[in-house]
Amino acid sequence: MITFWQKYKDYVFLLIIVVLLVLNIMNSNAIRTDVKQYEKRFDYIDAEINDLKLRNESIDRKIENNNTKIDIVNNKIESVDKTIRKIKENTDEKVGNIDNLKPSELELFFTNRYK
């Protein structure tokens, strides 16, 4: 007499394989859902990076603009420094000339100057 196991063993193995396949498919769908969630997160991070790049470019332009303004001010300062040096040299020369004057010439200089 053929026992139940011998008679239906092929069907039992087939049933086990089908159940395992169904479980595998169900688990793979859950993994795909997680992948979609990560893709959304990557898109969000990518958008944030692009926003930060735009802000960085704006800041770089402001820095460049400020550097240009600083260069202009530095040039003006150099010009003023040159003028101050020239005035100082002229003043030193005049003071030196006054030191060489005789007392009578010195009196005449100040008399003519404050008339």
Image (spheres, helix red, strand yellow):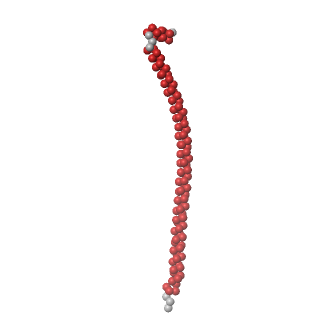
Q: Is residue 97 visible?
A: yes
Return the residue nearer the eye: 37 or 90: 90
Return the residue nearer the eye: 76 or 108: 108
Q: Residue 97: image x %, image y %? A: 46, 15
Q: Residue 59: image x %, image y %? A: 53, 43
User: Residue at image x 52%, y 84%?
Assistant: 8
Task: Tell me if residue 31 comes above or below residue 43 in the rendering.
Answer: below
Q: Is residue 114 visible?
A: no
Q: Residue 30: image x %, image y %? A: 52, 66
User: Residue at image x 52%, y 77%?
Assistant: 17
Task: Tell me if residue 8 comes above or below residue 20 in the rendering.
Answer: below
User: Residue at image x 51%, y 74%?
Assistant: 20
Q: Residue 12: image x %, image y %? A: 51, 81
Task: Tell me if residue 91 comes above or below residue 46 in the rendering.
Answer: above
Task: Tell me if residue 6 comes above or below residue 84 in the rendering.
Answer: below
View extreme (bottom): residue? 1
Return the residue nearer the eye: 64 or 10: 64
Say how many tags the image has. Answer: 0
